[in-house]
Amino acid sequence: MRQMSTYDLMESFRNANQWLGASALSFASYPLFSMLPNPAFQWMSAWGQVTERTFQRMVAKPDWGIRTFTCEDGKDHLVNIETVVSRPFGDLIHFQVSGREEQPRKVLLVAPMSGHYATLLRSTVKSLLVNCEVYVTDWHNARDIPVSEGKFDVEDYTLYLVDFMKALGPEVNVVAVCQPAPLALAATAYLAEIEPDAQPSTLTLIGGPVDPDAAATDVTDFGRRVTMGQLEEMMIQRVGFLHKGVGRLVYPGLLQLASFISMNGERHSKAFTDQILRVAQGEASDNDAHNRFYDEYLAVMDMTAEFYLSTVERIFKGLEIAQNRFVVDGHRVDIGKITDVAVKTVEGGKDDISAPGQCVAALDLCTGLPDSMKASYIEPEAGHYGIFAGRSWRNNIRPLVLDFIDANAGRHKPGKPANRNAAAG
């Protein structure tokens, strides 16, 4: 009950702050006060508007906001989001562009389960829709999943990826962003051993902690400093009575958000202070740069306790992927068994979450691949978000990823014998 009470207390705190913002906005916007030229009312109204929106977004799943797409024919085509595979903890969805011929490139974008919704990759999806069939892993908020659905840890996550890859077939090109990079690598290796005909055509890993010890960051240092017992005591709570997942042990999204913000507290504080000033001066808008970013950044979801704890224990502390001794469903996965899937890594030179060196370590683990099927790239000036969104992604990284996909298209086909020369090397 202690954990459940703490969970409800956090939600009450969030709700109270949203109410305070709404009350300040309503009070300062009362028509009578317009007769009094007092800037205090403008400041109160601006503070209330920003505060209400900030705390309101924390519990709302953002919309993808991709409703139409302009194709080469110059016409706007509707974009329909179709569910290809539906599972309790996450779905495989397809962005189907109505009236457009099916594109030759089939891309599975593996979204991270690290506090934010898959909509964090909205701009990535939009950039790939130009000439790809885009599929995305749409993970569910753990607080909305009944306890009766069972557990969900890193092994279950990996098996979900295996099922999604099998559903899309061997012509799919997997692009894993951040947290799922090591698990996407493990899922590919698992298929290489269990069902080789279902392996993807290519695997691109973007800014993921394949070997967290390769380069230290605040994230890896934190994982080293605390024990699993301390993590469980500090971070894990039970979902309260307001949600379908009542009683489920989770790492709450609000607690995750507090951790995110604390890593760059001064920058976030300045961003909100500046936004209040812009609102007070009438220079802000509903879809300005601040709101576009923070509407997404503040929208957080709970993750299951077992997923969070097993990620820290097995990926960061135990280095099971980095040392090639990861076990899935009782089967020890051998990453060296990947012989037919071209692998590319992408890192950001200024990534302070998954520093350069952590992701490229995947290539050393792929001992069964020849160098001709391996590639790596570092975007010198990109931070963590820049390697999958923004200018660096659009102008530099995306073209390289698509060139890599095209260069290795059709390399793996069902029934094709394994690459014996590569395996021998």
Image (cartoon, helix red, strand yellow):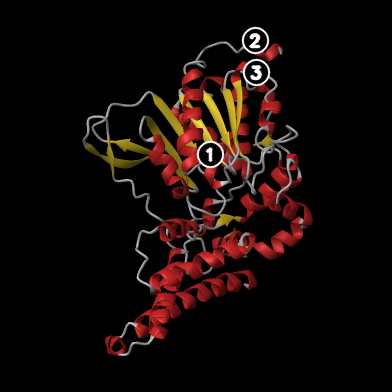
Q: Secondary structure at mark 2?
A: helix
Res 178 quadrant in image: top right
Three-letter amino acid code of the residue under disc 1: Tyr
Q: Nearer the viewer, mark 1 or mark 2?
A: 2
Q: 21 above or below 224?
A: below
Which residue corresponds to mark 3?
371
Per the rendering, the mark at residue 420 is 2
Q: Secondary structure at mark 3?
A: helix
Q: Is residue 333 visible?
A: yes
Residue at 53% from the left image edge and 39% from the top image edge: 160
Which residue corresponds to mark 1?
160
Q: Quadrant of the N terminus?
A: bottom right
| Label 2 packing within 10 angstroms: few (<14), some (14-19), many (20+) | few
Q: In 3D space, how far apart are the residues under numbered discs 2 and 3 (Cα atoms)?
A: 14 Å
Mark found first going from the N terminus, 3 or 1: 1
Q: Secondary structure at mark 1?
A: helix
Res 234 quadrant in image: bottom right
